[in-house]
Image: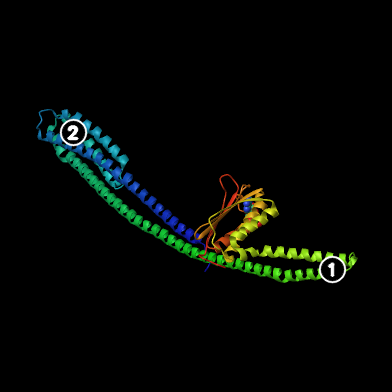
């Protein structure tokens, strides 16, 4: 299996997602800008312009009414009395035209503007003529001027204004349509964006999950293999130790015992006192010391009490030995009655106890230690406790004693915990299942 890390997949997924976000954001910004332009530049301006156009239209129709009153002679006033009204309307028209010219919506052409301006200028020039004729009392000439020229100019202005109004309406309708189009496009792209991001997330997530599952499977397989290997190593080690212990005890032990006895026999045959006899005694003492050392080594490698007396007795025997050798006072508490625990299980519990107590001597350096053993129906529990400085917060590499303890606990199908009791120190808690009715 290629050692591909999920980081590459995750980065790729992230890149795709980010690219989608950036692309969509840019697109939306551009569209929003378009909307803003359409909204304020076209629609708003058109509406304000149309208001002015309507104002002009209104003024023009007021002029129309006044001109009709004059020509039809329906009002009993002299013609000049209309002048102030005309002047007021002129002022309003000039103002409206000025505002309108400033707005100048997009659809308007300069031709239309100059046409309007021309008609306006001509109309007021001719109106001046009108008041002159009226002043001279040429009422009929004045009326004719209204009907022919003034009415024509007013009609021109009205037509241009109507056209401009229509243009504005059309431009607004087009803008509204374009706005709808933009909304539609943004909406469509929003769905696309969601789909792309969702797909990227799903694909990335799927790939990462698949990768993780493969990785977990691999790790658990390796862990299984490692456990098996560690178990085998420990078992083989114990087998070798047991064989060596037996060899040492049986072979070397017997030879040394025989040697000692023969030396004693020869020694007794020598004249007493004599230098030869002293030499022989010395040699015999060396042989005896070697025998003791061989026995000690044999016991260390594999205590024979385990095979002969089982775990319970072996623990007691070991604790006595340990106290004698180290001077540490072990407070031993036992609860329950242990079944016969055969050597196959016992050796590992025994080794854990050994390592735990050795750690008390080496690391806790306390004068006291506590060992509690509890036997239950199908389980035994053992605690090794000291009131020393406790385990360091950071696990140092190098020591394999605790690793070995854990391996042995796992080999027995049990578990081990290394605790820090509230009042300080270290507590090793072992719990192992006991094989039912084992009799070694
Ligand atoms: N009873 C204890 N009290 C304090 N520290 C301990 C005790 N037992 C173990 N340690 C710490 O844990 C480390 C690992 O222990 P271990 O695996 O047995 O390795 P080793 O004994 O060879 O150092 C030790 O170096 C020591 O720092
Ligand atoms: Mg140790």
Pick whichever, 172 or 220, lies toward us.
220
Q: Is residue 264 visible?
A: yes
In the image, what residue occupies the spot 15% across and 34% down?
A: 66
Q: Residues within 10 Å of mark 2 (few under 14, many from 20)?
A: many
Residue 318 is left or right of residue 148, and the answer is right
Ligand 2 lies under 8 Å from the Cβ of mark 1: no
State how far apart marks 1 and 2 are (Cα): 175 Å
Locate the C terminus by quadrant: bottom right
Task: Tell me where residue 236 sits by quadrant.
Answer: bottom right
- Compared with 435, 364 (above or below) is above
Pick whichever, 281 or 430, lies toward us.
281
In the image, what residue occupies the spot 28% across and 44% down?
A: 46
Q: Disc 2 designates what residue?
A: 130
Rendering coords of residue 235 (x, y %): 60, 67
Rendering coords of residue 385 (x, y %): 60, 51
Rendering coords of residue 147 (x, y %): 14, 39
Residue 362 is left or right of residue 188, and the answer is right
* Secondary structure at numbered mark 2: helix
Q: Residues within 10 Å of mark 1 (few under 14, many from 20)?
A: few
Residue 136 is left or right of residue 113, and the answer is left
Q: Disc 1 designates what residue?
A: 268
Residue 429 is left or right of residue 21, and the answer is right
Pick whichever, 370 or 267, lies toward us.
267
In the image, what residue occupies the spot 27% across and 38% down?
A: 97
Q: Is residue 397 visible?
A: no
Colouring used for the render: rainbow
Frontmost of labels 1 and 2 is 1
* Secondary structure at numbered mark 1: helix
Pick whichever, 2 or 125, lies toward us.
2
**N-terminal of the two: label 1 or label 2?**
2
- Compared with 42, 140 (above or below) is above
């Amino acid at each position: 299996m290629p050692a591909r890390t999920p980081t590459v997949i995750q980065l790729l997924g992230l890149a795709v997602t980010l690219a989608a976000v950036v692309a969509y954001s840019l697109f939306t910004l551009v569209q929003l800008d378009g909307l803003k332009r359409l909204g304020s530049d076209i629609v708003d301006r058109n509406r304000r312009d149309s208001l002015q156009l309507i104002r002009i239209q209104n003024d023009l129709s007021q002029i129309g009414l006044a001109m009709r009153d004059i020509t039809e002679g329906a009002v009993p006033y002299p013609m000049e009395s209309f002048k102030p009204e005309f002047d007021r309307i002129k002022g309003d028209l000039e103002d409206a035209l000025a505002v309108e010219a400033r707005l100048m919506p997009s659809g308007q052409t300069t031709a239309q503007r100059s046409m309007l301006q021309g008609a306006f200028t001509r109309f007021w020039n001719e109106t001046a003529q009108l008041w002159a004729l009226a002043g001279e009392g040429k009422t009929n000439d004045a009326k004719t001027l209204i009907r022919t020229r003034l009415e024509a100019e007013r009609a021109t202005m009205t037509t241009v204004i109507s056209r401009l109004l229509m243009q504005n309406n059309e431009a607004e309708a087009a803008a509204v349509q374009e706005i709808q189009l933009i909304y539609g496009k943004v909406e469509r792209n929003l769905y696309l964006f969601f789909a792309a991001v969702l797909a990227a997330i799903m694909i990335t997530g799927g790939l990462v999950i698949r990768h993780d599952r493969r990785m977990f499977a691999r790790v658990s397989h390796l862990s299984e293999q490692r456990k098996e290997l560690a178990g085998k190593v420990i078992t083989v080690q114990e087998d070798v130790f047991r064989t060596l212990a037996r060899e040492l005890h049986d072979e070397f032990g017997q030879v040394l015992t025989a040697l000692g006895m023969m030396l004693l026999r020869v020694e007794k045959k020598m004249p007493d006192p004599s230098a030869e006899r002293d030499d022989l005694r010395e040699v015999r003492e060396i042989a005896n010391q070697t025998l003791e050392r061989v026995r000690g080594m044999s016991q260390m490698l594999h205590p024979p009490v385990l095979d002969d007396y089982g775990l319970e007795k072996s623990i007691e025997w070991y604790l006595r030995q340990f106290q004698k050798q180290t001077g540490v006072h072990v407070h031993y508490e036992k609860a329950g009655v242990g079944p016969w625990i055969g050597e196959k299980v016992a050796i590992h519990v025994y080794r854990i106890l050994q390592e735990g107590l050795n750690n008390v001597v080496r690391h806790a350096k306390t004068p006291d230690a506590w060992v509690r053993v509890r036997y239950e129906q199908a389980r035994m529990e053992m605690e090794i406790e000291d009131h020393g400085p406790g385990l360091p917060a950071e696990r140092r590499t190098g020591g394999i004693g605790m690793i070995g303890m854990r391996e042995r606990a796992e080999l027995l199908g049990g578990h081990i915990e290394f605790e820090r009791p509230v009042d300080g120190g270290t507590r090793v808690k072992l719990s192992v299942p006991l094989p039912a009715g084992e009799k070694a």
